Image (cartoon, rainbow, N blue to C red):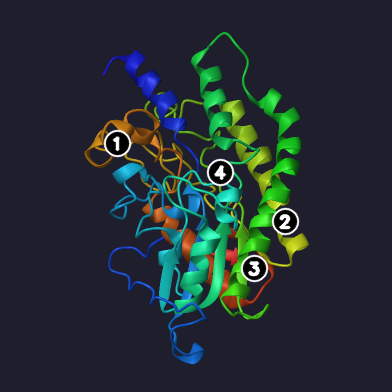
């Protein structure tokens, strides 16, 4: 493929970053009546639910659920490999997250994203049909931080060998962006609590876990992968993202969790040593996707797929990454801790460390 086309795909791929219905094979919720649960509380199956954006919907993990692959404009890309389905916390796992969602899409607001309505409103029905024991929320990247635009801007800087990088500008803007994002995520958290109250739950009868984001890239890239077919970023910019921007993201979510009285799990270093382009040419050991272009997206989305949807899997955790994140979430929730971070242990697996 000519190099100019590769560079074009690199920009298009990262523009897709953005970061339901139970997956195929999962038992669908029992419809609830207007006055509450359809069956007794003690008899309902336990469930753990995920809400948020692409980082938790399973974007990048592949094998997306029918109906979320672009059909009729729904590009939520919910995957049976998503981290919530890799937890061992309940009898059922329900994924309501959607790629590209922002905090308002999670809230109880009258909102539509990729044809789907409020995630919190759908949580009410799930909570009536099941006994929800935990809700895991990962959202905010698509609000004021504009993570997509930020990475696209960094790639454009890489495309210009005579210019400067993106870190200097982002370093001055990032704190203000995070400060503007935090209240919106707080609204989403409080609406999740309200939704569960509407479903008949008492405060404290379930866990809400707010997570941060893992760095998709590192300055410790494989030399061959550092380019349009892998990670077209300046090393200094990748270093800024991994060591400053993503940890500051974590600090912002820690504050959100403290102010809303919920649990916090820090993913900032969760894929450390396993980021995109950190492995060999065969991508062994990587838990994050490199630039990934899916030319078959049009098979489900038609002409709507042309453009960013062909590359929206780029720089998201792959199936292995989601499995490790799900492992860490399980450890964290079962530990009863209020706050922890996910770190790779001596055994090579991800663990929740207080």
Residue 194 bears which disc, if any?
3
What is the spatial separation of the Cα atoms under label 4 and label 2, in whole angstroms? 20 Å
Give the mark nearest the N terminus, 4 or 1. 4
Contact check, label 1 and label 3, Cβ < 8 Å: no
Which residue was labeled with disc 1?
Answer: 294
Q: Which residue corresponds to mark 2?
A: 256
Upstream in the sequence, badge 3 or badge 2? 3
- Which residue is painted at 52% across and 27% down in the image? 152
Q: Nearer the viewer, residue 14 or 109?
A: 109
- For disc 4, the marked residue is 215
Q: Residues within 10 Å of mark 2 (few under 14, many from 20)?
A: many
Q: CA distance from mark 1 to mark 3?
A: 39 Å
Percent of width and height locating residue 12 = 41, 26
Vertical order, 159 against 106 (above or below):
above
Q: CA distance from mark 3 to mark 2?
A: 17 Å
Residue 294 can be seen in this image: yes
Rendering coords of residue 305 (x, y %)? 32, 34
Nearest the eye: 330 or 97: 97
């Amino acid at each position: 493929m000519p190099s100019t086309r590769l560079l074009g795909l690199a920009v298009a791929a990262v523009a897709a970053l953005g970061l339901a219905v139970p997956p195929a094979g999962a038992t669908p919720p029992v419809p609830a009546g207007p006055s509450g649960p359809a069956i007794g509380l003690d008899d309902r199956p336990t469930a753990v639910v995920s809400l948020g954006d692409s980082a938790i919907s399973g974007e990048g993990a592949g094998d997306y659920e029918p109906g979320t692959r672009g059909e009729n404009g729904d590009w939520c890309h919910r995957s049976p490999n998503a981290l919530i389905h890799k937890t061992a916390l309940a009898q059922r796992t329900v994924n309501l997250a959607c790629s590209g969602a922002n905090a308002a899409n999670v809230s109880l607001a009258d909102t539509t994203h990729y044809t789907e309505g409020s995630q919190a409103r759908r949580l009410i029905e799930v909570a009536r049909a099941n006994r929800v024991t935990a809700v895991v929320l990962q959202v905010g990247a698509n609000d004021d931080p504009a993570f997509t635009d930020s990475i696209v801007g960094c790639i454009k800087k890489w495309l210009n060998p005579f210019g400067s990088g993106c870190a200097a500008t982002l370093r001055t803007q990032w704190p203000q962006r995070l400060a503007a994002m935090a209240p919106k995520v707080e609204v989403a958290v409080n609406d999740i609590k309200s939704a569960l109250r509407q479903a008949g739950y008492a405060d404290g009868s379930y866990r809400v876990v707010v997570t941060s984001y893992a760095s998709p890239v590192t300055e410790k890239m494989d030399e061959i992968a550092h380019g349009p077919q892998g990670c077209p970023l300046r090393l200094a910019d990748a270093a800024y993202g991994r060591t400053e921007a993503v940890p500051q993201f974590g600090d912002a979510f820690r504050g959100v969790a403290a102010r809303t009285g919920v649990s916090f799990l820090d993913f900032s270093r969760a894929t450390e040593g396993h980021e995109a382009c950190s492995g060999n040419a065969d991508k062994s050991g990587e838990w994050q996707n490199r630039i990934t272009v899916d030319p078959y997206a049009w098979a489900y989305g038609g002409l709507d797929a042309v453009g960013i949807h062909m590359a929206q899997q780029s720089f998201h955790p792959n199936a292995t990454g989601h499995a490790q994140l799900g492992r860490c979430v399980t450890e964290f929730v079962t530990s009863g801790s209020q706050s922890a971070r996910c770190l790779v242990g001596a055994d090579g697996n991800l663990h929740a460390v207080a």
